[in-house]
Amino acid sequence: MTKFLDYAGTSVSWLCLVHCLAMPLFVSFLPLFGLSFLADEATELVIISVSICLAIISFLPSYLKRHRKLNPIFLFVGGISMIILSHLLFEENIAGKVAFLLLGSCGITAAHLLNHSYCKSCEAH
């Protein structure tokens, strides 16, 4: 189950990145296809919330029952912080926003992959 949750968390992280990077380019075309809800801030909050929920149900059991290493949790907290800061600090500065989003998504991806690796090594022992 942890493997699935880590892969799902990685996918949601990259979905968030693609969503945030594509919105400025496609925002004017979304209503033509009935997809204007994608440009809504609520969609961003849902994606971030799903990412946080997946991390909690993936990292906490893995930490408590298997590897006892905090590195994945720290990486995730750093990554999600970068994504949240990108929305709070860089609304007008696209370069700063993209940099923080990319770093945040990479941090979350690294956290899930590291967690998966730790769990896998625990199963080998």
Image (cartoon, grey):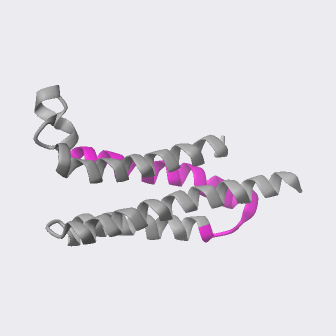
Q: What x and y, as percent, mark residue 9? A: 51, 48
Return the x and y of residue 94 as percentages of the image width and height: 21, 66
Taking the image as drawn, is residue 50 in sight? no
Please indicate whether residue 64 sits to the left or right of residue 57 in the image: right
What residue range appears in magenta? 42-71
Image coords of residue 52 (percent x, y): 44, 54
Q: How many marks?
A: 0
Residue found at x 37% / y 69%: 82
Position of 98 relative to 53 (above/below): below
Q: In this view of the protein, which residue sits in the foreground, 43 or 24?
A: 24
Q: Is residue 52 above or below residue 103?
A: above
- Counting from the top left corner in percent of width and height, residue 125 is at 89, 57
Within the magenta stretch, is there residue 87? no
Q: Residue at x 49, y 60 (%)?
A: 108
Q: Residue furthest top?
A: 33
**Residue placed at 68% from the left, 59% from the top?**
64
Q: Quadrant of the N terminus?
A: top right
Residue 44 is inside the magenta segment: yes
Quadrant of residue 96 within the rendered picture: bottom left
**Residue 77 visible, this orientation:** yes
Q: Main secondary structure of the magenta part?
A: helix
Q: Is residue 31 left or right of residue 65?
A: left
In this picture, residue 116 sits left or right of residue 32: right
Task: Name which residue lies at 59% across and 51% down.
Answer: 58
Please name whichever residue, 3 or 100, is drawn nearer the observer in this view of the structure: 100
